[in-house]
Image (cartoon, grey):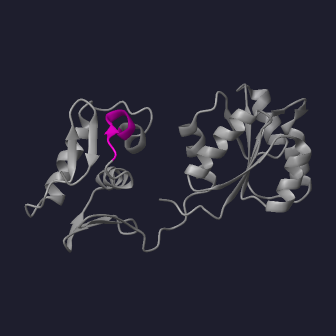
Amino acid sequence: MSDNHNLCVLVVESDTALAATIGNDLQTAGFNPVLAYNLQDAWQQATQHHPALVIIDRTISTSSGLDLCNQLRRGGYRQPILILVSRDTVEDRVACLDAGADDYFLKPYRSDVFLQRIHLYLPPKAVKNEQLQFGELILDLATRRALRNGREIDLTMKEFELLRYLMSHPRETLTREQILENVWGYEFMGASNVIEVYVRYLRLKIEDEGEKRLIQTVRGVGYVLREN
């Protein structure tokens, strides 16, 4: 869980459906999205909210998003600006950089690629005393250790990420595809049984003292964190 709730991200996109999708993804990731649909509105929102990052579609109605990028830089805005573009050519890259943009990403819009890029520029703040809990199982997000009935459990990085994902969605059946995408990455191409292997590792560690099983197998679907 990232602590980004105070970080405002301005999205300048004339396609209202795409703007709404981007805004929803940002909100889910813990940011505070502000939407603008034209250059004038965008300038007003930037002046009012002082966003931590601005996302601009290169083509806004009949205008150029690069003009807004230039305007923001001339006005003293120093935070990251990302441009959404339809083509990836040398000319497009140079134009974005010349306008003062920090980076660009390509259409069609993909949530996973987009959020990865956002987190490069707005990494989650350091976690302080934040925990997830399910029954007697506690996951400390700062130390990356689990505790069950007061017993400390050391986890590898991937074990931690898998357990965090399961504990973030308690009692919700998660498909293998969801787990692969969120724990191993959207384009993971490793062994097909990697989830089963890591679930077995986790079970051995969190059930070491004969405790009740918490990670349940849903045959043909995936896994769910529940007590029975």
- Residue 154: x and y in percent read 24, 64
Q: Residue 207 falls in which quadrant of the image?
A: bottom left
Q: Give, as a single range, the part of the protein colored magenta.
A: 172-179
- Residue 180: x and y in percent read 36, 37
The residue at 78%/45% (across/down) is 101
User: Left or right: 112 with respect to 211?
Assistant: right
The residue at 36%/52% (across/down) is 161
User: Left or right: 24 with respect to 16?
Assistant: left
Residue 117 in view, yes or no:
no
- Residue 205: x and y in percent read 17, 58
Q: Is residue 83 above or below residue 131?
A: above
Q: How many marks?
A: 0
User: Left or right: 194 with respect to 167?
Assistant: left
The residue at 62%/56% (across/down) is 31
User: Left or right: 115 with respect to 71?
Assistant: left
Q: Is residue 7 above or below residue 95?
A: below
- Residue nearest the observer in this picture, 145 or 70: 145
- Residue nearest the observer in this picture, 225 or 201: 225
- Residue 15: x and y in percent read 76, 32
Residue 213 in view, yes or no:
yes
Magenta-span inclusion, residue 40: no
